[in-house]
Image (cartoon, rainbow, N blue to C red):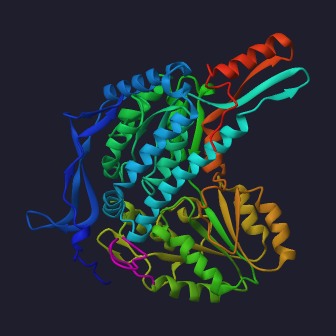
């Protein structure tokens, strides 16, 4: 296998730094306790002249005492719904958010470079993640304006006037994923706080340093206690926070086992709102009349974009038996032609894996599949170089293999031949997951009934295209173990809020009070003013 180049362009050189600050109650505090080093899986020559993982810096290894202090700050800022932030005018909250995103944009190059080093995301995708996040914030601001305009009026049913708006839920514990440590995390955090909730945010294990350049922007943009940012292990931070019962919303993108564990720590589960983006085993179903050139192009992107480390990745391909030989041949050749390299190298589609143990896990899946009748059908499948594993296409695959059941979340692609369309449909129905599916074909007589069935098994049917999250204005959710609530620009605002209203009987006494209330502007809730 070709070795990865060690020539690093000057603009992408990285100097290790200690992230010794955290945000608590509106203060950037200096951490003096234990620390954890942060390494990149990209290997370079260290000061001792040895080749090994690159030291990027260090982060605080915080204890439960600090976590509980952050909870107290968030709880105080919310003040049972009576705090400054939840009662603030919409225009003022949006002004704070505008200030933040403008400050955030100043750190684009720093964050992008850390995305490349920390999680080995290629340059193009790293810039896309940053820019997409900025767009997401602006879109969320505009969506909240629309929501506010809809609420700036009275409804009447019978003799009851109602002024209906959406209000916050309380204190949010926000835990983001490593694969999109900026975008996916902010898709939780931004709608949560813009709706008037307060938050405690702990970055993921990988992709943690890139939050450091943004700490001051958060500190300068929001009132004390609205956003509290901590670093450390989940069991030391998230667990004691949940045990208090003071968390109103658990916002997590990760694995369902983590979500269940944290829920179990909460003493009042009936009061806990869940906003969860979890794992998936998204299938691609290739019908007999599929355009193979288009299908293979989309399946390459769908299975291997960011090395398959996406919940929206295609994790299994069902190919009709009439196409299986041609598909396998062409698809395997296309996979073997993919360029791998370091994140800053031009056109690097495949990059090293950020998790130190992931190559061994992929090898374990390959070994298990081969022992149970599968074969690696592409020439370069499973080749190793440092923390890089070349994608492996496995065929045939059966239900005795780990690869059949587990969300591999990496560069290994199971292919299954089917004779009857009921085979992939039955597998999807029996699966614990239900996020998306990609359907490839052109005969509408077959596609039509299939869409009707698939729409009740997953939450997004992609016609002749790979599974994906965007555009961010479209719903992003899942059935069964894949999600709870919906994350998108519009839906996330609703996920982090609740409908609440003021009601009054239609009589002269109440009407006079309401009119005086509106004219006096004494209430930020009862108002017909809105932002254009």
Q: Is residue 135 above or below residue 98?
A: below
Specify whether residue 356 is painted magenta: no
Residue 171 place in picture, x, y as percent: 51, 29
Residue 337 or 406: which is nearer the viewer? 337
Q: Residue at image x 25%, y 79%? A: 5
Q: Residue at image x 54%, y 23%? A: 267
Q: Can the viewer see residue 260?
A: no
Q: Residue at image x 33%, y 61%? A: 109
Outermost top residue? 509
Residue 18 or 314: which is nearer the viewer? 18
Left or right: 517 with respect to 198?
right
**Location of the C terminus (image quadrant):** top right
Specify whether residue 345 is painted magenta: yes
Residue 313 place in picture, x, y as percent: 56, 65
Q: Which residues are magenta?
A: 338-351
Q: Is residue 514 above or below residue 414?
A: above
Outermost right residue? 158
Q: Residue at image x 82%, y 80%? A: 443
| Corner quadrant of residue 110 | bottom left
Secondary structure mostly seen in the magenta stretch: loop
Left or right: 314 with respect to 164?
left
**Location of the N terminus (image quadrant):** bottom left
Residue 521 or 254: which is nearer the viewer? 521
Q: Is residue 126 above or below residue 187?
A: below
């Amino acid at each position: 296998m070709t070795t990865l180049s060690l020539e690093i362009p000057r603009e992408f050189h990285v100097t290790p730094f200690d992230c010794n600050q955290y945000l608590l109650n509106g203060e950037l505090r200096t951490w003096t306790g234990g620390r954890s080093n942060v390494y990149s899986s990209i290997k370079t020559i260290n000061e001792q002249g040895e080749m090994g993982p690159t030291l990027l810096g260090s982060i605080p290894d915080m204890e439960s005492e600090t976590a509980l202090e952050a909870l107290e700050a968030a709880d105080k800022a919310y003040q049972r719904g009576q705090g400054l932030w939840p009662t603030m005018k919409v225009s003022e909250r949006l002004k704070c958010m505008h200030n933040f995103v403008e400050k955030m944009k100043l750190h684009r190059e720093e964050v992008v470079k850390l995305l490349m080093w920390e999680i080995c995301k290629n340059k193009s995708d790293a810039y896309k993640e940053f820019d997409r996040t900025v767009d997401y914030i602006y879109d969320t601001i505009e969506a909240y304006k629309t929501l506010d305009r809809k609420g700036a009026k009275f409804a009447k049913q019978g003799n009851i006037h109602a002024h209906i708006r959406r209000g916050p839920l309380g204190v949010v514990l926000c835990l983001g994923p490593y694969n999109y440590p900026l975008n996916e995390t902010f898709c939780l955090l931004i709608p949560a706080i813009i709706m008037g909730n307060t938050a405690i945010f702990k970055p993921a294990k990988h992709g943690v340093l890139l939050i450091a350049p943004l700490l001051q922007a958060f500190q300068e943009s929001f009132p004390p206690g609205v956003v509290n940012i901590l670093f450390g292990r989940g069991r030391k931070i998230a667990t004691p926070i949940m045990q208090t019962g003071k968390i109103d919303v658990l916002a997590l993108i990760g694995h369902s086992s983590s979500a269940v564990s944290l829920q179990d720590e909460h003493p009042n589960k009936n009061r806990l709102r869940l906003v969860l983006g979890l794992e998936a085993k998204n299938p691609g179903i290739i019908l007999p009349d599929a355009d193979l050139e288009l299908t293979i192009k989309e399946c390459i992107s769908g299975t291997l974009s960011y090395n398959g480390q996406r919940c929206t990745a295609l994790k299994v391909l069902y190919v009709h038996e009439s196409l299986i030989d041609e598909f396998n041949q062409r698809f395997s050749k296309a996979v073997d032609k993919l360029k791998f390299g370091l994140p800053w190298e031009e056109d690097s589609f495949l990059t090293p894996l950020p998790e130190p143990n992931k190559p061994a896990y992929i090898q374990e899946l390959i070994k298990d599949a081969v022992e149970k009748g599968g074969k690696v059908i592409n020439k370069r499948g499973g080749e190793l170089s440092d923390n890089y594993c070349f994608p492996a296409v496995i065929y045939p695959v059966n239900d005795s293999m780990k690869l059949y059941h587990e969300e591999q979340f990496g560069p290994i692609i199971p292919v299954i031949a089917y004779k009857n369309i009921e085979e992939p449909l039955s597998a999807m129905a029996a699966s614990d997951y239900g996020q998306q599916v990609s359907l490839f074909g052109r005969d509408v007589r077959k596609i039509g009934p299939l869409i009707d069935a698939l729409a009740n098994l997953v939450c997004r049917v992609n016609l002749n295209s790979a599974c994906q999250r965007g555009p961010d204005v479209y719903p992003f959710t899942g059935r069964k173990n894949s999600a709870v609530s919906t994350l998108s620009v519009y839906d996330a605002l609703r996920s982090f809020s609740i409908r609440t209203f003021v009601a009054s009987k239609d009589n002269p006494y109440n009407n006079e009070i309401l009119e005086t209330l509106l004219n006096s502007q004494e209430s930020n809730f009862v108002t017909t003013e809105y932002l254009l």
